[in-house]
Image (spheres, coloured by chain):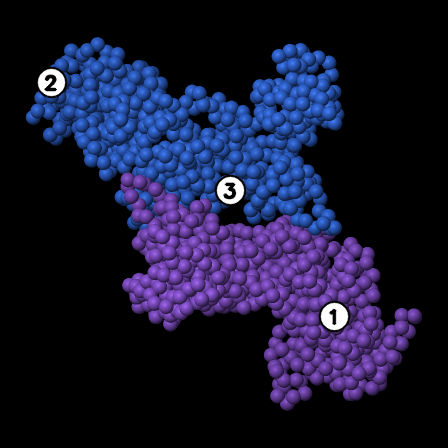
Chain colours: A blue, B purple
Amino acid sequence: MTEDCLAVFSPSGLRGRFAQGTTLLDAARRLGVDLDSVCGGRGICGRCQVTIEEGSFPKLGIDSRGDHVSAWNDVEGRYAERRGALPDGRRLGCQAALCGDVAIDVPADSQVHRQVVRKRAATHPIAVDPLIHLHYVDVAQPDMHDPASDFRRLCDALAAQWGLTDIHADLAVLRGLQTVLRQGAWNVTVAVRNRRDIVAIWPGLRAQAHGLAVDIGSTTIAAHLCDLVTGDVVASAGVMNPQIRMGEDLMSRVSFVMMNPGGERALTESVRAALRGLIGDVTRDAGLVPADVLEMTVVGNPIMHHLFLGLDPTELGGAPFALTIDAGFELRAREAELDIAPGGFVYLLPCIAGHVGADTAGVVLSEGPHLRDEITLLVDVGTNAELVLGNRSRLLACSSPTGPAFEGAQISCGQRAAPGAIERLRIDRETFEPRFQVIGCASWSDDPAFADTGVTGICGSGIIEAIAEMFLAGLLTSDGVIDGAQAARTPRIVADGRTFSYVISEATPRLVITQSDVRAIQLAKGALYAGARLLMDRYGVASPDRITLAGAFGSHIDVAYAMVLGLIPDCDLAKVSAAGNAAGTGARIALLNAAARVEIEALVRRIEKIETAIEPEFQRHFIDAMAIPHKTDPFARLRAVMRLPPAPDEDAIAAGRRGRRRR
Amino acid sequence: MTEDCLAVFSPSGLRGRFAQGTTLLDAARRLGVDLDSVCGGRGICGRCQVTIEEGSFPKLGIDSRGDHVSAWNDVEGRYAERRGALPDGRRLGCQAALCGDVAIDVPADSQVHRQVVRKRAATHPIAVDPLIHLHYVDVAQPDMHDPASDFRRLCDALAAQWGLTDIHADLAVLRGLQTVLRQGAWNVTVAVRNRRDIVAIWPGLRAQAHGLAVDIGSTTIAAHLCDLVTGDVVASAGVMNPQIRMGEDLMSRVSFVMMNPGGERALTESVRAALRGLIGDVTRDAGLVPADVLEMTVVGNPIMHHLFLGLDPTELGGAPFALTIDAGFELRAREAELDIAPGGFVYLLPCIAGHVGADTAGVVLSEGPHLRDEITLLVDVGTNAELVLGNRSRLLACSSPTGPAFEGAQISCGQRAAPGAIERLRIDRETFEPRFQVIGCASWSDDPAFADTGVTGICGSGIIEAIAEMFLAGLLTSDGVIDGAQAARTPRIVADGRTFSYVISEATPRLVITQSDVRAIQLAKGALYAGARLLMDRYGVASPDRITLAGAFGSHIDVAYAMVLGLIPDCDLAKVSAAGNAAGTGARIALLNAAARVEIEALVRRIEKIETAIEPEFQRHFIDAMAIPHKTDPFARLRAVMRLPPAPDEDAIAAGRRGRRRR
């Protein structure tokens, strides 16, 4: 055969000459063109659709007017009959054959490596290129003259029809093999992971593949069911982490294990039970069953990571905070007592250090500081704050012991971010009267529509705003003392033993900000700022170019108020952003893109880990950062942040702060 | 440093020059000398003991009189104190260092690759070279400045101290990691499988390693606990296969599954429970615990193989007898619900065909027909007979449907080989009186010491002898008819409807050989012979050079009688032998020698499988082989076998046989 037809594929630009009669799919494969196919060229999956460009393309050296590809055939006719007509001008690449020179367009939906909408670092899109691919095969029937097993004949088919030569199956997959082969009359679709492990087998053709990205937080567990073909999230669900009944915060769960030897079994079982529930929920929502989940990825802090795996977290409860394992880790889902696809795996992102877990690795993967020249500060606030600072040349990470004050814990009227919690608060500069918004109600408290709205407490972002507003209104000194002298001007400042409180509401429950609430926030924000400062010192920069706040707290907080209080270092406000559940996004990226796992595992190894607990500098920064706003140029920043003219009492405040420091 | 000391090791003859001060262990390793060490040169395991040859060795170019190695040191002193003095002239190779030219002998017990006593094919010894090796390591302690996980530091130690660079651990191993590292004060012994998977970790030094070889028969399950260092069997145990309550023979167990969908779960659970019991028994006998078993190997026929794995055997119950999997297969022991070492694996030898299982693969591995020029016929008689014929250039295998008659089933007074069963029987040529031996009693029945011995039935070998003796005594024609005319000469021949029986004993239970018993044995032996004939035809030989009878039946049967009856083809009697539990030996070889697994997996692929059920020739051979002795030159063989002069009635018998055939 002479190689007499030129085929030029767009958008890749790949080109080559082929014998007449070569199908477009074959030509694409031989050139390495990204053209999908599940059924392997049998004209039944419809994944290899292409458009033939009719016309003269002098630049390509092609004039394809006329019959340069074979005519519409019976296989295409049957496909259109069963699955609906192809879009205009489309052909099945496995059926249309070259008859002359031709230009062929591969539409986005026929490419294996589709790009997801979300982009990292603005310029680094994530391609959908999961570890799992579907392969339709025609398996030889058993023959008494050649008694090869069903599995061997399946392997032979995968080798001959898909070039997969090192196929493994575990017991759970083998158990259903004979039935599925016979149900499918020796035509089956095989989900193969990493060109090696069979994850699932279905009779006949199957073109759907799904995976689940999971973020195990100490408070909530979130799961996102993703289409492994399109990259879309098709269903999401969240649930409270049931471990809470064995300890509200992380350290109390570690204590639970220390007090109850073997207690990690109960903690592990409860989180796995919650995951089984979530898997049931999201698959039901999507019209699927749990066995349709082919792969899972998991992020979580080190203690959640260890407890999910059933590893005793005791060592993480005290110095030197030794992890059992920090590398990316994969296991069969059923080893974690999760019933997904019979041969399905769970992949856990790597942990960075004893306090900086796979959740932070997920944030890094999602936000991509290592892909930029600009220096990014990533802040993930939970019970502790995890911080990552750096750019493509260098990354540092640490954890700051903020405690749970930002989550509303250890605050007299604090509560979690839930309906009824104050999340926004303003104090009138003249009357000192507060107005606020609560979660679950769109109106402010001074709006008549607010009447009868139940108010139950103050969540993290509400406390931040309340304290910042008290400071801006002159009710709080920069040293964090509620000013008792103001009691003469407003009944909202009340004596409370030797200190004073600010009364937000006299209703039931009575809501106040006490002096010790202010101290708790000061400690938390001092720790957060000190961690950032420590990383900046180590990196050798005065301020980051960008700040990204990850997690629920980062989403709810008003960044301007965070700057007023000095939670985060100086930075152009336009460069401060909230990333939402970036850890969960990292899990989703690792689910959809196999290379991302290699990327984050290598990256985590080169992140420099700073242990704040043993850094004397940290203590110094911590003490310095207790003031409100903290020492570094507070007022210039304040004006910029609040877009306010200089306040009349600015000098007085500054004087007061200096005065107290001299005392 | 100059390379100024010559070291010559025996028995390998390896030699090289090394700097002064090089330890003998280091020198050995650099030369590739087979010198063991578990502790990696720390002087605590005592595995690297060597003998320094004192004297002048002109042929080696060595005169090692004087101080050519360093003096006995403190480490050796402490070793001797703790573990007992070294044998005379021995040194620890890791402590003794070169000071001059020296000849060093590595005694057999210091070699890694010791040879087991058992030899295959007379000239092919099996070296003890298991997949699992022990490695003692010194692990770095956790450090807050470098927060690598415990597992990473363990991997770093295995890489630096043993060159193991691709180490994996699964959850069950990781679960105990932190505790063991701290118990051992950062010194631990790691059992590593295939230079990759951690199977177990112990605090401190551990030099013992054990594995278990298992033969799952349809009637009995046998387990042999082996020392993976010496190759010795340290404990054995056997138990009835509890699946018997769900079906006496293989096909009735398949029927059980077909009648009770999901019933394979019960069969699988029962065999696994029996194995758990055996693991407990053999480890207790050896003063060990189940977790000390680091690896298991398993052989069994295809149905036992599938049921152990939890695979539905239904397809094996009918043509085309498709196996789910035939390749060698390994799985974590806990996947088979067996609690051995936390990361322990089970390896199943490959199956050859739907009727020829991993047990036959074990027989082949043990008997090594592929290592000889002579053509061997392997015969493994169970409910069916598996046959393998060939030599190093070609091997063929088939299964013959002998049915269970050879096991005493379907015989009127038949029973399994157990105490009380007649296993030997002679008939007086004049009086036709029988004398016999039963299992459990050394005396013959005509010995006064036999009195009061309970006789319960006849086992397979007893039936073979009874029928052969009836023929030799002239009570049975060569067509297999009990000769009623002889009733006139002896009361032991009695009418039984239209046919006759031979009465062995009138006691309770009354023991007789009926005409239908003879027919059952004729069918069984016809099938067995026809299978062998079919293989010989295919191979193109008239007779094998050697015959090896494997299994319990092969061990109990008197080979001469088997030849009288024509169970097996003509062969020099000196070349016919019983191999005992060769399948179990094959499992043991695969346990002790990693290369043997590769060998048998490759070999099984090139064995030509013959399916007797669809071979018309088989039917022809089967019919021809029904006669006693069968058609091919019976009398010459008979005389040779029995070392008898021509019998007076030989011509009459031959005439009778011919006469009946003419009828």
The numbered mark at residue A6 is none
Residue A255 to residue B557: above or below: above
Query: Which tag is nearer the camera, tag 1 or tag 3?
Result: 1
Q: Position of residue B40 (x, y in %)?
A: 38, 56
The residue wearing badge 3 is A339
Q: Which amino acid type is marked by label 2?
A: Ala
Towards the viewer: B435 or A30: A30
Towards the viewer: A643 or B259: A643
Asked whether residue B531 is in view, the answer is: yes
Label 3 environment density (alpha carbons within 10 Å; few <14, some 14–19, many ≥20) = some
Residue A406 to residue B202: above or below: above
| Residue occupying the far bottom of the picture | B448
Circle 1: element type = loop
Q: Which amino acid type is marked by label 3?
A: Asp
Dot 3 or dot 2, earlier in sequence = 3
The residue wearing badge 1 is B571
The residue wearing badge 2 is A655
Query: Which tag is nearer the camera, tag 3 or tag 2?
Result: 2
Query: Which tag is nearer the camera, tag 1 or tag 2?
Result: 1
Q: Residue at x 75, y 85 (%)?
A: B428
Subunit bearing disc 1 = B
Quarter of the image where one finds residue A156: top right
Left or right: residue B347 versus residue A424 is: right
Residue B453 to residue B610: above or below: below
Subunit bearing disc 3 = A
Q: Residue at x 67, y 85 (%)?
A: B445
Asked whether residue B225 is in view, the answer is: no
Q: Position of residue B54 (x, y in %)?
A: 39, 69
Label 1 environment density (alpha carbons within 10 Å; few <14, some 14–19, many ≥20) = some
| Residue occupying the far right of the picture | B663
